[in-house]
Image (cartoon, helix red, strand yellow):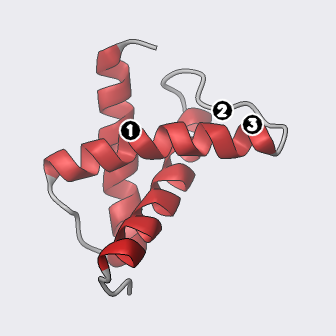
Amino acid sequence: MSFLAWIVLGLVAGFIASKIVNNTGQGLVVDVLLGIVGAVVGGFLFNQFGQPGVSGVNLYSLLVAIVGAVVVLWLYHALLGRRVV
């Protein structure tokens, strides 16, 4: 997957995960970074359970990235001591 595709997938996944976790975004840069990290984490988690990870820009990869981004955001808030609503 190209670098631009990772950015787009990370932006969308980070934004959606931010809305799921605490109903507000963290800011454009943080959403993108956490979304990209979430895509990697989601791909790793899905591979551990025998499912394919992020394979391109498609709905399945978006779902994987969102799941990973939710996990990353939850850990981000837990480590920084912020309240997750």
79, above or below 67, in the image: below
Q: Secondary structure at mark 1?
A: helix
Question: From mark 2 to mark 1, how far is it between C-alphas?
Answer: 13 Å
**For the point 22% across and 64% down, which residue is it?**
25
Question: From mark 3 to mark 2, how far is it between C-alphas?
Answer: 6 Å
- From this viewpoint, which residue is outermost toward the front? 79
Q: Disc 3 marks which residue?
A: 47
- Residues 47 and 67: in front is 47
Q: Taking 82 as reference, is 51 left or right?
A: right
Q: Secondary structure at mark 2?
A: loop
Q: Taking 40 as reference, is 13 left or right?
A: left
Q: Which mark is residue 36?
A: 1
Q: Secondary structure at mark 3?
A: helix
Q: Are marks 3 and 2 in contact (CB under 8 Å)?
A: yes
Look at label 2 and name its amino acid.
Gly
Residue 84 sits in quarter:
bottom left
Q: Disc 2 marks which residue?
A: 53
